[in-house]
Structures are given as structure tokens and as C-alpha cells.
Image (spheres, rainbow, N blue to C red):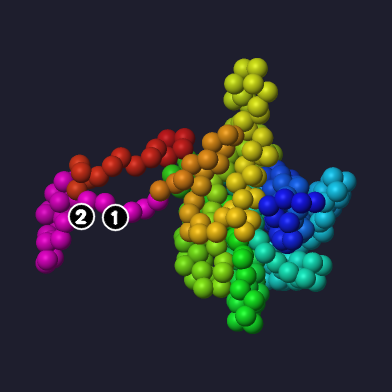
Amino acid sequence: MSGICEGRTVVVTGAGRGLGRAHALAFAAEGAHVVVNDLGVGLDGAPDADSPAAQVVAEIRAAGGEAVAHGGDIATTEGANSLITTALETYGRLDTLVNNAGFLRDRMLVNLDEDDWDAVMRVHLKGHFLPLKQAAAYWRAEAKAGRMPVARVVNTSSGAGLLGSVGQGNYSAAKAGIVGLTLVAAAEFARYGVQVNAIAPAARTRMTEQAFAQTMAAPGSGFDAMAPENVSPLVVWLGSAGSEGVSGRVFEVEGGRITVMEGWRVGPSTDKGERWTPKEAGETARKLLEEAGTPGQVYGA
Ligand SMILES: NC(=O)c1ccc[n+]([C@@H]2O[C@H](COP(=O)([O-])OP(=O)(O)OC[C@H]3O[C@@H](n4cnc5c(N)ncnc54)[C@H](O)[C@@H]3O)[C@@H](O)[C@H]2O)c1
């Protein structure tokens, strides 16, 4: 297949369903060879019987594309390493990594168990870090061997990570962490030809089917604004050579809308040149807050 990713090998984690599946199909349609990873777990991360990665590979091949399945857990060193090895052994190269796999364990903070905290941190943060580290080791070796990569990483944050979301303290913290990881990886890997960006998507998947049951389509337009397929075109472009010069950025993507998110930046500031008393510090903080912009509202607040 020809397209903007022709000749590239792309790994997508959690690509057996939802957004990851849509990304994998979209990359294949643009000519990429795709490694479709999915452990096949339930909505809360509990083991599940089906093998969704193999089904997506079959769909890609039926459409004339090229793909291979990987069923490992990306939040383990063994799973992450074998994922990258699958790309290299099957297609001889790796060009793009899309970190997407994840699940939810939503509770109000006072009711949140340690296990639910750990499981969500593990799948999102460790599940981004380990494949990223392994892919970057390959790209660094390529760069050192004189073959400068045109490599791309697309990480998956969330509006919950950018603004916060009531009932999702663990998930919001993990998804905010993914933004920090994206910024550092973009800075560290630039010298190896690797660009790293993040998306904060919104789409109707099993994860959000209750929240997004209504399609929000303009009446009669036939456009399903909450279809996961709407998110994938930007991911494919970010994962292509054509996104040259774009790194360390976060995009919200939903329906037909693409938004550049502008994150923490230095705001109003005062330097006394010596230590404040607590009373003075409070008065100064209040004055600075009057000059500062209003933060976005926490989802569900
Ligand atoms: N759907 C949305 O509106 C939305 C909004 C913001 C962020 N996200 C994020 O987008 C990503 C995809 O979510 P989705 O809505 O498509 O959910 P989904 O449940 O449909 O798909 C996630 C997939 O990840 C797989 N997975 C889970 N743990 C894994 C592991 N350890 N190793 C390999 N695969 C694993 C699951 O089996 C599942 O197929 C997630 O990171 C999610 O947090 C989704």
C-alpha cells in the first residue's frame, strides 16, 4: 500500500481495540508495516480470553496491508523488549512507536485502593516508559552507526492528565506523568533523530462508551464525531516523516477538532531578593494570582 508511511515500521501498543486498533488500521492504510500489540485484558486490566491483536492483523491483511501481532504485556521489560524485537525481526526496522495501551480503575480518592493506584501507574507510566526506552536504545545505536533515524513516538495522555478529572485521581496523575515523560524524551532523543509528542484523545470506545453514548454529530451530517477513527489521522501524521520539526508538543484530538495544548509556562512572578515572612508570602501570592490567568476547570468538578 502507498501513502505517507510507506516503508515505515510502526508499533502500536494496545491496538486490539478502540483507539489503538483505529491507529493500526490507519497506519497500514498509509503503507506502514504495523506491529499490533495487545495483551487482551478487560476494561480494568483483568485477564481476558480473546486475542484482539490477531483480529486486527487479519483486518489489516484483508484490506491489503501488512501487519504482525504481538500479545505481550508492555508494562514488563520482557513484553516491551519482545515487542521491539518483533518489529526488528519481522520487518528489519522500527520507525514509529505509538504508546496507547491502558485501562482505568476509577474511584474517588478516599475510596481508591493501593492496588488500583499501582495498576494504573504501572500500565500507563511503566507501559509508556519501557517500550520507549527499548525503542530509543535501537534508535541511538542506529544513529551511532551513522544511520540517522527519522523516528517518531506518539504517547497517549488524556484531558484528565492535562486538567484533572474528578473520580480519576490515579489516571489523571499517570496521564500527567506521560506529558512530563514526553517532554524529557523529546529533549533527550532529539540528537538521535527521534521526535516525541503526545495526544489527549476523546472517542467512544469501551473505556468511554457510557460517557460518550451520544454521538454529538450535527443532525443529518452523518459524521460520527466520537468515532476513534477521527483521532488516528493526526497520530499517523505525527508518526510519519512529514511531521519533521514537531516534537515535545501535546495535541487534543476529538471529532474534527485538533487543538494544540499550551501547558505550564512562567506566569506572574515577584522576587523580593530575601526570604518572605509567611504573611508577606500569602499577600504576594494573592496579588500574583489576581494577575494570573484562570486555570481550566477540572473535568467533573
Ligand atoms: N477513549 C477515550 O476517549 C480516551 C480519552 C483519553 C485517553 N484515552 C487513552 O487512549 C488509550 C486507548 O484507550 P481506548 O479508549 O482505546 O481503550 P480500550 O480499552 O478500547 O483499548 C485499550 C487496549 O489496551 C490493551 N491493554 C491494556 N493493558 C495492556 C498491556 N499491559 N499490554 C498490552 N495491551 C494492553 C487492552 O487489552 C485494550 O485492547 C488509553 O491509554 C486511554 O487511557 C482514551
Quarter of the image with the C terminus is: top left
Residue 70 % position (x, y): 79, 61
Which amino acid lies under the numbered mark 1 shown in the image of this protein? Val
Residue 19 % position (x, y): 67, 45
**Residue 241: in sight, yes or no?**
yes
Which residue carries the number 1 mark?
A: 266
Asked if the stretch drawn in magenta spans residue 286, the answer is: yes
Tell me if label 2 and label 1 are in contact, CB under 8 Å: yes
Rendered residue at 48%/54% (across/down)? 249
* Magenta residues, dominant SS class: loop
In the shown orientation, is residue 167 left or right of residue 86? left
The image shows residue 113, relative to residue 9, as above or below, that is above
Mark 1 crowd level (few <14, some 14–19, many ≥20, 10 Å Cα): few
Q: Nearer the viewer, residue 201 or 96?
A: 96
Mark 2 crowd level (few <14, some 14–19, many ≥20, 10 Å Cα): few
Rendered residue at 60%/46% (across/down)? 234
Q: CA distance from mark 2 to mark 1?
A: 8 Å
Asked if the stretch drawn in magenta spans residue 99, the answer is: no
Q: Which residues are magenta?
A: 263-287
Rendered residue at 80%/51% (across/down)? 1
Which amino acid lies under the numbered mark 2 shown in the image of this protein? Ser
The image shows residue 210, relative to residue 38, as above or below, that is above
Rendered residue at 77%/58% (across/down)? 33
Which residue carries the number 2 mark?
A: 269
Q: Nearer the viewer, residue 27 or 252?
A: 27
Residue 165 % position (x, y): 48, 42
Q: Nearer the viewer, residue 210 or 144?
A: 144
In the shown orientation, is residue 71 left or right of residue 254? right
